[in-house]
Amino acid sequence: MHPAILGLLTIVIGVGACVGYFYFSNLFLDKVLFPPKGPNAGRNINRANMIRPWLFLLPALFALGLYLAYPVVETIRLSLTDRDQGGAFVGLANYSQMLGEPKFWEAMRNNMLWLIVVPALSTAFGLLVAQLTDRLAWGNFAKSLIFMPMAISFVGAAVIWKLVYDARPPGTEQIGVLNALYIWFGGTEPQQWLTLPFWNNFFLMIVLVWIQTGFAMVILSAALRGIPEETVEAAIVDGANPFQIFFQIKVPQIMGTIVVVWTTITIVVLKVFDIVFAMTNGQWETQVLANYMYDKLFRASDWGVGSAAAMVIMLLVTPILVWNVYNARKEMR
C-alpha cells in the first residue's frame, strides 16, 4: 500500500475509533449502566457524571500505563537479571559490573560536563537574544531564524554540524567551514576536530546549544514581555542605565521562568543520545549515558547492564522533572 494512503487510513481509523469510543461509551453509560429514569433517576445521573470524566481519561491512562509505567517496571526487572543465565535473578550484579567499567564513568563525567555547559549557554544566549530583539522592528524575523533549528531533528542537526567539522587531506579544498577558517587564518593542516580528546565534547555540545537556544529564547521573550512597564519606567526615572535595568529589574522578575527553562534543558541533556551517536558514536572519549546504554543493550546484547544504565538515567532525570513541574505550576498560580 502507498505510504500516503496508509497514512490517510491510519488517520481516518484512529480518529474514527476515538469518536466511536467516546460516543458509544457515553451511550452505554447513560442508556444501559445508569439510565436516567425510574425512582433512582437523580442518583443515576449523579453516578454517571462521576464516572464520565474517567471515560475520557481512560485511553490516556491506558497509553501511559502501556508505554510508560510498564517499560519502567520491565526495565527494573531486566536490570536484576542476567541474559547469559537464561534470565536468572542476579540482584545488583549488573549494577556492580556497570560501576566497574571505565566507559560508564567516562559517560558520567561527560554527562556532568554537558550539564554544566549546555543549559547555562542555551539559557544565557536565549535570554540575550530575547532582550536584544525585543524592541527591534525586525526582531520577529531574527527570532524565527534562531528558532528554526528547533524544527530540525537531532540527527539532522548532527549531520549538518558534522559537515561543519569535516576535514579533507592537506592541500585539498576544505568543505568543512571550521577547517576552511582555520587554514585561512594560517593553520598548517586541517584538524580532525571530533577526535581531539576533551575538546571534542565541546564541539558536540555546540550542536545542542544551537538547537536549544531557540526554545529558551521563545519562553524568555514571552516572560520579558510580561514585565510591567511601570517598573522599567520607574527605574529609568531613577537614573538606571540599560545594564542595571536588565540585571536588577528584569532578570529578578523572570527568575522563575529562567529556572524552568534551565531545568527543562537539563532534562534534555541528561537524555542526549542522537548527537553523540551520529557524530562520534561515543568514540574518542565522548561517551554519554544514553549511548552507553544503547551499546550495552543492542550491540553487546547485555540487557542487564543496559537496563541498569537506563535506570541510572531515570534516577537522574526524575528529581529534576518533579522539581520542574512544581516550579511550572507555581508560576501559573
Image (spheres, helix red, strand yellow):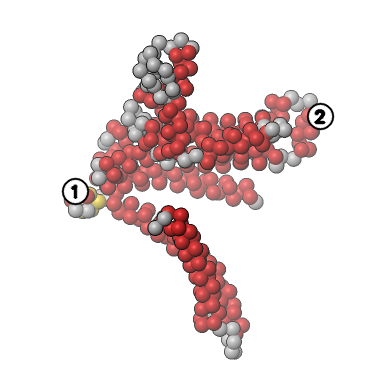
Image coordinates of residue 133 in percent, x first then y, are 67, 32
Q: Residue at 48% x, 59% y: name it.
A: 8
Specify the farthest residue to the bottom: 39
Badge 1 vs badge 2, beta-carbon distance below 8 Å: no
**How far from the left and from the top, in percent, is residue 183?**
44, 14
Q: Secondary structure beneath disc 1?
A: helix
Q: Which residue is mark 1?
A: 84
Residue at position x 65%, y 35% in the image:
141
Q: Nearer the viewer, residue 275 or 138?
A: 138
Front residue of this view, candidates 151 and 61:
151
Type of amino acid under label 1: Asp
**Residue 68 image offset from top left, x and y in percent:** 41, 55
Quadrant into which the N terminus falls: bottom left
Mark 1–mark 2 distance (CA, rounded to whole Å):
74 Å
Left or right relative to 312: residue 33 = right
x, y percent for residue 64: 44, 58
Q: Is residue 29 left or right of residue 289?
A: right
Q: Residue at x 19, y 53 (%)?
A: 86
Residue placed farthest to the left in the image? 85
Q: Residue shown at 43%/12% (left/top)?
A: 187
Q: Between disc 1 and disc 2, whose residue precedes?
A: 1
* Figure quadrant of residue 69: bottom left
Residue to which mark 2 is pinned: 237
Q: Secondary structure at mark 2?
A: helix
Closer to the observer: label 1 or label 2? 1
